[in-house]
Amino acid sequence: MAYQCPVCGYPGLEEAPVSPEGSPSFEICPSCGFEFGVTDGDEGFSYRQWREQWVSKGCKWWSEHHEPPPQWDPVLQLASLIEDRS
């Protein structure tokens, strides 16, 4: 099962960013680079702050170890976050 990154909308996370009990996964989103439990917990970034920073830097694929999926489109990812809120 894949999970969506609540920061950038990437649909391929291997774990839920936060468990039902509230524990972070510590997974790093390969799209935007947000590490759940570190970027937010230790560094104090909100999802919105990290998203704004990622967007301001051009929505570049973050991971150097994983290639982006075929036809990867960060704009569509971000749009899926907006659609999920409606």
Image (cartoon, grey):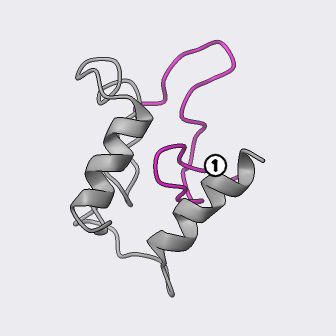
Dot 1 alpha-carbon crowd within 10 angstroms: few under 14, some 14 to 19, many 20 or more? some
Looking at the rendered structure, the secondary structure element under dot 1 is loop
Residue drawn 38% across the image and 47% down it: 51
Q: What secondary structure is the magenta-colored segment mainly?
A: loop
Q: Which residues are magenta?
A: 1-26
In this rendering, the answer to whether 4 lies above or below 48 is below
Residue 64 screen position, x and y as percent: 22, 66
Residue drawn 60% across the image and 37% down it: 16
Task: Answer with the quarter of the image where residue 61 lies.
Answer: bottom left
On whether residue 7 falls in the magenta region, the answer is yes
In this rendering, the answer to whether 43 lies above or below 76 is above
The residue most toward the bottom is 71
Disc 1 residue type (three-letter): Tyr
Q: Describe residue 70's horizontal placement relative to residue 36 as left or right.
A: right
In this rendering, the answer to whether 36 lies above or below 23 is below
Q: Describe residue 19's horizontal placement relative to residue 57 as left or right.
A: right
Residue drawn 54% across the image and 43% down it: 6
